[in-house]
């Protein structure tokens, strides 16, 4: 669906994005994360065809977005980081207005707008957008990006400025789109959200792609997994204790297996076994503070 073929973007000689190479398939949700100024918005704008790479090519379904922009843009929904809306229109009027720009037949547009208003829980669609809260405005902007049912959805910080419940709702909504074969690219600073919704994550640092992989692989390669066992024994042992239990910690699956065998062989009683994995945030902080990257 998407192929960034060695894409670099320079602004007046300053390299904002350097030699990005990645692919995303239909049905995938890809998270792009990185510090302020890492190049996330620049990358998303190039994929949306709004700015041209200085070198390299962005292919959407095998076609260069710069050469086939008009045709390809019909398949793209783009939510900018900041999305000014027409404040003196109601949400419904605003979406109808955009449906006309997309040449959507009126009856179809009405149905689609109703569907989006309902699924995004956009209440009071007849109210002027200028009277909406920030979260409601963001939902209108998301509805606009989805209006023409694009195959590729590019969302630049969709949750910026939203309260936790609305953010959670938007993330759940994006998850529900996974089955529609859309490719979704989103940038976000809330790594918990990225972790919960994205199939693969791209980590940018100073315009370069440090990591692009599934959460599972990122955790396995860059994170830590810790196992903790609590057990009881009718004898005095040198393990750490909490209340009546002895505690055992390890990062190694082989040590865990050996300890479980030992507990069984000695007739001790297993009370609890827990595994904890590094959160994306922990891995991200480690990467960002590594001076070698
Ligand atoms: P944030 O998390 O703060 O939104 P970002 O990762 O989206 O940051 P970009 O907006 O892509 O980062 O910016 C990457 C770099 O390119 C920054 O150093 C920024 O100052 C610079 N930059 C972005 N747009 C322009 C522009 N139009 N002209 C000059 N420099 C720009």
Image (cartoon, helix red, strand yellow):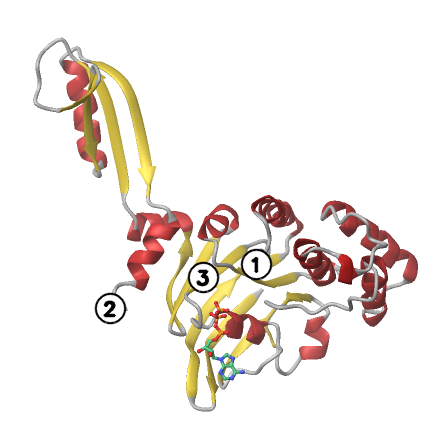
> How many numbered circles are shown?
3
Q: Residue furthest right?
A: 107
Q: Residues within 10 Å of mark 1 (few under 14, many from 20)?
A: some
**Comes first in the chain, label 1 or label 3:** 3
Residue that badge 3 annotates: 33
- Specify the quadrant of the image occupied by residue 273: top left
**Comes first in the chain, label 2 or label 3:** 3
Q: Secondary structure at mark 1?
A: loop
Residue that badge 2 annotates: 291
Please give left or right for residue 189 compared with residue 145 in the image.
Answer: left
> Which x, y percent locates residue 139?
69, 55
Q: How far separated are the C-alphas under marks 2 and 3?
A: 18 Å
- Is 258 in front, or is 287? 287
Q: How far separated are the C-alphas under marks 2 and 1?
A: 29 Å
- Residue 293 visible? The answer is yes
Q: Quadrant of the N terminus?
A: bottom right
Q: Secondary structure at mark 3?
A: strand
Q: Residues within 10 Å of mark 2 (few under 14, many from 20)?
A: few
Residue 265, numbered label: none
Q: How far separated are the C-alphas under marks 1 and 3?
A: 14 Å
Q: Residue at x 55, y 67 (%)?
A: 2
Q: Secondary structure at mark 2?
A: loop
The reply to whether dot 2 and dot 1 touch (C-beta < 8 Å) is no
Q: Residues within 10 Å of mark 3 (few under 14, many from 20)?
A: many
Q: Is mark 2 within 8 Å of ligand 1?
A: no
């Amino acid at each position: 669906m998407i192929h960034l073929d060695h894409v670099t973007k320079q602004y007046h000689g300053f390299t904002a994005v350097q030699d990005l190479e990645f692919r995303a398939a239909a049905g995938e949700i890809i998270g792009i994360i990185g510090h302020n100024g890492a190049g996330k918005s620049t990358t998303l704008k190039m994929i949306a065809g709004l700015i041209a790479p200085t070198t390299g090519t962005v292919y959407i379904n095998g076609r260069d977005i710069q050469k086939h922009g008009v045709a390809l843009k019909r398949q793209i929904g783009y939510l900018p980081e900041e999305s000014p809306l027409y404040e003196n229109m109601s949400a419904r009027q605003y979406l109808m207005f955009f449906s006309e720009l997309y040449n959507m037949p009126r009856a179809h547009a009405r149905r689609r707008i109703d569907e989006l208003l309902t699924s995004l829980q956009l209440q009071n669609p007849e109210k002027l957008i200028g009277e909406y809260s920030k979260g409601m405005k963001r939902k209108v902007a998301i509805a606009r990006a989805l209006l023409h049912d694009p195959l590729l959805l590019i969302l630049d910080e969709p949750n910026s400025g939203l309260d936790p419940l609305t953010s959670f709702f938007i993330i759940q909504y994006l998850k529900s789109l996974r089955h529609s074969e859309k490719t979704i690219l989103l940038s976000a600073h809330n790594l918990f959200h990225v972790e919960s919704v994205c199939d693969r994550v791209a980590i940018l640092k100073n315009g370069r792609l440090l990591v692009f992989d599934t959460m599972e692989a990122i955790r396995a390669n860059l994170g830590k997994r810790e196992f903790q066992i609590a057990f009881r024994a009718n004898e005095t042992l040198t393990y750490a204790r909490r209340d009546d239990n002895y505690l055992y910690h390890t990062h190694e699956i082989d040590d865990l297996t050996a300890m479980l065998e030992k507990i069984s062989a000695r007739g001790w009683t297993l009370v609890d076994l827990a595994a904890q994995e590094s959160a994306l945030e922990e891995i991200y902080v480690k990467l960002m503070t590594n001076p070698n990257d």
